[in-house]
Amino acid sequence: MPPAIETTDLVKEYGDLRALQELSLTVEEGEFFGLLGPNGAGKTTFINTLVGLVRKTGGDARVFGHDVEDDYRQARDAIGLAPQEFNVDRFFPIREVLEHKAGYHGVPEDEAAERADEVLKRVGIYDKRNERFDWLSGGMKRRLLLARALVTDPDLLILDEPTAGVDVQLRHDLWDLVTELNEEGTTILLTTHYIEEAERLCDRVAIMNEGRKVTVATPDDLKTRGTDTISVRLESQISAGATADLETDLGAYAHEVTTSAAGESLEVRVDDGGSTAPQLLNDLEAMGYEIVDLEISRTSLEEIFVDLTRSEDRTVTRSSASSADDGAEENGEKKRDVEREREQEGVA
């Protein structure tokens, strides 16, 4: 089987602005894949390209081997999308909304009704089936978006910030549900700002910044790219001038040494706390310090994410074709063109 998602040198430009910059990414069938990045990284543009809301400027994008433009119908029928924004018809009961959605994908009327009931039960709002969208609570609206994505029985489920603004209980309920769907064989692409969410759910994550792929790795692999902190509490105090000497005496494995204001404890930043702790203890004891307590803390995935996406300027990324001597009037006209194109394509 071909990959669930495969893009090669994918580019999307809005005038001078490159929202996607030669993005090459592969998501295997059955994978739970996370897409992380700051606001403006290109995550939603990438998703909109896959589902046909945005036409790519260059490169290739395929869903289960189907080109997202040349084989639009086959690619789109394979995808269930739960978007960030609430874009539901407010004039019909939610059960009918789901029936209509299934009908758009060629599902017969009787089967569409059965599927609507099934997914409403699965997401826990079947008892609200005859109510309109506006009458639902915020959490129920999120559940409905997921139900609408599932009513076509997709092979690829795309969740764009699915737990944004929901309470903790609903977030955990949704985590359990999407984990169950993935275990049943559904490929899932998740975008999220919650690092804990990606760490808990995803097999692999891609970190994006300025339309580029920064890295792809498992959450555990990403954590190994950071440093650990060994916190040591001592029996006796460290003198005010001893910290600099400690950093020198402990050798190359100690990247940074800091002491508390009272001098009764110190923190040592190292690459691998587990393997380095015995050597640190031996070195400190050889210097005459008596160890009372020791604790190792690993760098969080959030810290790795911040380090990888840190940039001096993330305001605008321009294509290489942009000329440095564009006048203010020309730039203003290009900006208006970009805004018109984005409005036409419905890009958030």
Image: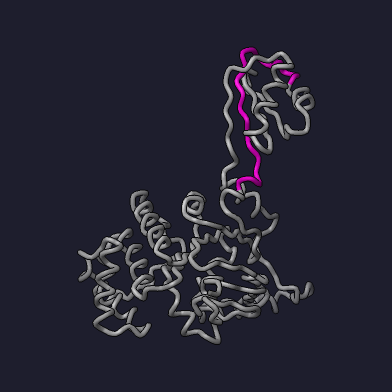
Q: Quadrant of residue 245?
A: top right
Q: Residue at x 66, y 47 (%)?
A: 225
| Residue 134 placement, left or right of 175 | left
Q: Quadrant of residue 139?
A: bottom left
Where residue 97 appears, as percent x and y from the top left, is 29, 76
State the scheme by which the image is colored: one colour
x and y percent of residue 344 in the render? 51, 81
Q: Which residues are magenta?
A: 223-242
Q: Residue 326 colored magenta?
A: no
Tell me if residue 263 comes above or below residue 145 in the rendering. Answer: above
Of residue 137 and residue 146, the one placed in the foreground of this image is 146
* Residue 25 spot, x, y in % from top left: 61, 68
Report if residue 227 lies within the magenta region.
Answer: yes
Q: Residue at x 61, y 80 (%)?
A: 337
> Which residue is farthest front?
1
Q: Residue at x 25, y 77 (%)?
A: 113
Vertical position of residue 40 compared to residue 225: above or below: below
Percent of width and height locating residue 249: 78, 24
Would you identify the image quadrant in which residue 204 lies? Answer: bottom right
Residue appearing at x 30%, y 74% in the figure: 90
- Say left or right for 79 vs 241: left
**Number of marks drawn:** 0
